[in-house]
Image (tube, rainbow, N blue to C red):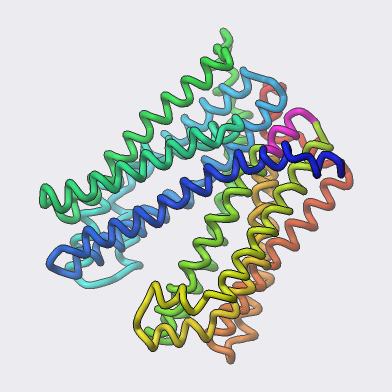
Amino acid sequence: MWSSFLNGARHRQVFALALPMVLSNITVPLLGLVDTIVIGHLEHAYYLGGVAVGATIISLIFWLLGFLRMSTTGLAAQAVGAGDSERLLQVLARGLLLAWGLALMILLVQQPLMDLAFWLVGGSSEVQLYGRDYVMIRIWSAPAALTNLVLLGWLLGNQNARAPMLLLILGNGANILLDIWFVLGLGWQVKGAAAASVLADYLAMALGAWLVWRTLQSRGVMPAADFWQRTLHLAAFKRLLGLNRDIFIRALCLQLCFAFMTFQGARLGDEVLAANAVLMNFLMFISFGLDGFAYAVEAMVGKAVGARDRVGFRLACGLNLFWGGVVAVLFTLVFALAGDLLIGLITNISAVRNQALQYLPWLVLMPLAACWCFILDGIFIGTTRGREMRDMMLLSTAGVFFPVWWLAQELGNHGLWLAMLCFMLARGLTLGWAWWRLDRRQGFMDHDDVMRETNDV
């Protein structure tokens, strides 16, 4: 195994999967920046506030449904590893049916969902008005946005990171161009920003469908005579829903901790809130760098599990943990040596800069604490071990984040950042323990996971 680890071809395989996802992730903050610039050039601040609130609500809904991509990646990768084309097609069909069902539910309950969201968010009457205008249009992208999650996950599970990169770059690139045209060119204001996002999602869906069709053609995949009977089997769907339920609970816990960080920071004053927002932007960039290797390990370990290749599985884990650690060290060095400069690029408000510099040491440590949980998350996603992910996240949230914050309240915002650092460490340690326990008894290889449902029905 050591000789395989030193094999340059293995490392190139990691980067062939990781780099395209890192590059495509860069378009996400770029889209947010263009949105802010375009809407920020309108005559009133409440336009920008309305778009910010509306986009946050929509993004949260779609982000919580990210289990569609995660489960599809793991299941598709395992099908590829097993060389089972029929199962690969079933993974796609079940994922799409689930995505369309959830999209229909969102559209049916959009009014009460919107009322609840805006009641929780608050804001001025103008922000509420334009925020609702944005959401009422943007919500109609749900079928395309959820379909894109499945298509992206399925393509990545096929060990193809370039296709998801094209999907994300086209979608976000089209959104940027349409944003400028609709808002500034046609004068549609907030409704133009929402319409641009909707149209871009459907354009991306069309490209994604074409990329999937090409992949199926190249693999020569054709549905069997009893394809739909086996695909729609109730037991198979129940197992798929169980996996997605566990990943959803994990996402809720993660979002709860980040939301608590924001809300609790707001109680400590506007300057602390603004400083935390600046530093959380850097945390977002950490995630962009590490997510690429998390995506890579999802595809690689899923394929190894499907092929029952224990050596390949361990090698995929080791390679991505190694490179995740290297990237974490680089981020730590950048923040330690140039943190002051980077903060100055984001804000020129001296009070906010001083506050951010005060808490910068926590951010310097964050990559070293967080890199392991990013990669281990990818390992458990690729092996479709949703229950372990759920349990370790619940333990890290209820057993570490909130107790540490409670005990460190006298430290103020330092206590918040201490809780976040311990939370990231706990996620890595608990997932690492779960990985060791499963690998010791070959649980990853013997796991009767959702992937194996094709053999059961």
Residue range in magenta is 300-308
Q: Residue furthest bottom?
A: 410
Q: Residue at (15%, 69%) from the top-left corner?
A: 44
x 53%, y 17%: residue: 228
Residue 149 in view in this figure: yes
**x and y percentages locating residue 179 in the rendered image:** 23, 49
Specify the quadrant of the image occupied by residue 120. Answer: bottom left
Query: x and y percent of residue 169 in the render?
Result: 40, 42
Q: In the rendered structure, does residue 307 fall within the stretch colored magenta?
A: yes
Is 187 displayed left or right of 101 in the figure? left
248 left or right of 439 in image: left
Place residue 101 in its image quadrant.
top left
Residue 395, given in percent of the width and then of the height, sits at 69, 64
Res 128 → quadrant = bottom left
Taking depth in this image into account, of 383 and 391 the one nearest to the observer is 383
Q: Residue at x 60, y 78 (%)?
A: 362
User: Which corner quadrant holds the C terminus?
Assistant: top right
Q: Measured along the vertical axis of the image, is residue 167 above or below residue 394?
A: above
Q: Is residue 176 above or below residue 80?
A: below
State the residue at coordinates (32%, 34%). 203
